[in-house]
Amino acid sequence: MTTPLPFDVFSSELLPGETVQWTGRPNAAVILHKETGARFHSACYGEDLRFFWLLGASGIGNFWTNRPDKTFQWFGVIWGTPFVLVGQYMIWGRFVYGYWKKQRTYYGLTTRRALIVVNGFRGRTASSAYFENMTIIDKSVRHDGIGSISFGGPVTGEWRWGRNNPPRPPTFDDIDSADSVYQIAARLREQAQKPTSSRGPSAW
């Protein structure tokens, strides 16, 4: 089912002759994924250590010595605070940011590509994957029909660690009726990859 969107969301991104076949948005109510539990536990464990270390460095809970060294304390506070803030973001801040981002994310399937538009902090960004050169369309769907579709590679979690991970392909995250959207994308990809002679008369 096509989700009504503002008329001008994709108009500035479309190429000559390109038309929109489906539009949608991520379901903002979905905040938990398969990888969330393990990473939440890991973040909480690490945050406990960082928090108590910061208390000790600040002198509020000095567990190491009864002779506070003010130079060490201030260095510890300045050095440790960014790590604590990052830990807080990993525990709950990323869910707030994810909800905010979903409210400003738009998905579209056109006759030529899968298109993602995000109105973020620094302005508007757009990314796309062209059907003509696409080798794979992958999906991961929950029992309630909400799922994610990736264009050009397997569906992977948005939060990944390590330097050896390949770039995440353009992905429609947490969309309703994912199976139906997948069928539309598969049909558009098949049409885009047909030989030119079988698509009908040339536009020229």
Image (cartoon, grey):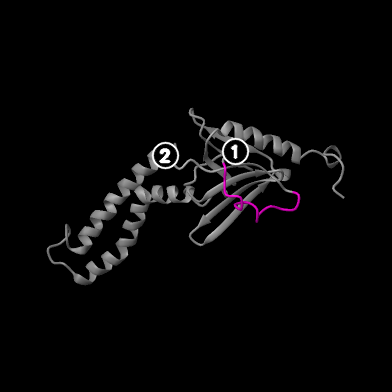
The residue where tag 2 is placed is 32
Q: In terms of secondary structure, where does tag 2 sit?
A: loop
* Residue 98 appears left or right of 80: right
* Number of marks in picture: 2
Q: Is residue 200 visible?
A: yes
Q: Residue furthest left?
A: 66
Residue 8 belongs to the span the image colors magenta: yes
| Disc sitting over residue 2 in the figure | 1
Q: In terms of secondary structure, where does tag 1 sit?
A: loop
Q: Is residue 165 visible?
A: no
Crowding around mark 2 (Cα neighbors within 10 Å: few <14, some 14 to 19, many 20+) is few
Q: Position of residue 38 (x, y in %)?
A: 38, 40
N-terminal label among 1 and 2: 1
Q: Name the kind of residue labelled 1 in the image.
A: Thr
Q: Which residues are magenta?
A: 4-17
Q: Is residue 64 above or below residue 135?
A: below
Q: Name the kind of residue labelled 2 in the image.
A: Leu
